[in-house]
Amino acid sequence: MGRTPEDFEAARTRLVDQLVDRGHVERASTERALRAVPRHEFVPEGNRRSAYEDRPLPIGNGQTISAPHMVAIMTDLLALEPGDRVLEIGTGCGYHAAVVSEIVGAGNVYSVEYEADLARESRERLSRLGYDVHVRQGDGHAGWPEHAPYDAAYVTCAPETVPDAVVQQVRTGGRVVAPEGTSRQTLVVLTPTETGVSREVHGRVRFVPMRGGSE
């Protein structure tokens, strides 16, 4: 017997309550966004019963939807405000873009997805669910320069190092949040400054490898 919309809503409430209790969510805007976005709509039907478990789930093409706590942590670190223009590298199923869109508003998220099928499917899904997110297929190493400068950017797959083009497309004082590394990955926050780029490290993580570039 399938779950009802009420079942999913109750499961989402429990999940976000747990994330807050465990200290994974600090910003009220992130909490509101996580409570608003129906994660089960972004998960393949065969995995929907697990949509509100705090773990990654496969979405096809060798890719995953990130664990909710990681989406929460990365979104908090971006320190977003309404109206911010945001670059996402790695649309995947579109869930993280929807969370960010809840904070920054319609039309302010620009997302690049390497896999053509995932780009098309996520574009259609986001539109159906009422999210105005710009999605294009392409190599995320190049960013999306036509809409730069961005107030923030984030990467949902792990490059060996954060692509220079992505950092360069973020304004001075903005933030780039990304996993970085191959066998050993860390979550980094990069902030372009007048004299260079400042760097913070926020612990070990595990993401699928970033596609494209020199592969």
Image (cartoon, rainbow, N blue to C red):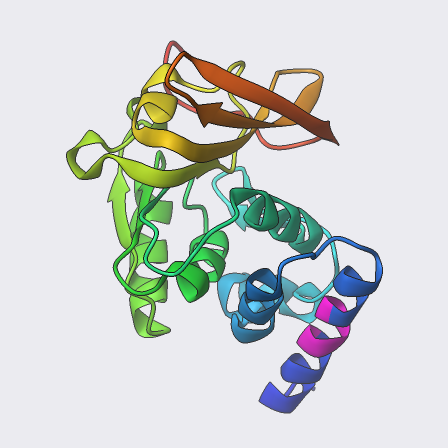
Please, is residue 90 above or below residue 212 in the view? below
User: In this orientation, which residue lies closer to the viewer: 78 or 122?
Assistant: 78
Residue 193 drawn at (x, y percent) = 41, 21
Is 54 left or right of 167, judged from the image as shown? right
Residue 197 drawn at (x, y percent) = 46, 17
Query: What residue lies at 29% left-to-right and 62% top-to-bottom?
Result: 124
Q: Main secondary structure of the magenta part?
A: helix
Query: What residue lies at 61% left-to-right and 17% top-to-bottom?
Result: 181
Q: Is residue 141 visible?
A: no
Number of marks in the rendered image: 0
The image quadrant that residue 27 belongs to is: bottom right
Query: What residue lies at 70% left-to-right and 57% top-to-bottom?
Result: 25
Residue 15 falls within the magenta-colored stretch? yes
Is 68 left or right of 204, judged from the image as shown? left
- Highlighted magenta segment, given as a residue range: 12-16
Work out which quarter of the rendered image holds the N terminus and state it: bottom right
Q: Is residue 37 visible?
A: yes
Work out which quarter of the rendered image holds the C terminus and state it: top left
Please, is residue 206 above or below residue 108 in the view? above
User: In this orientation, which residue lies closer to the viewer: 67 or 150?
Assistant: 150
User: In this orientation, which residue lies closer to the viewer: 128 or 200?
Assistant: 200
Residue 109 drawn at (x, y percent) = 33, 51
Residue 31 falls within the magenta-colored stretch? no
Q: Residue furthest front?
A: 194
Please, is residue 121 above or below residue 147 in the view? below
Is 147 left or right of 96, judged from the image as shown? left
Residue 189 drawn at (x, y percent) = 56, 29
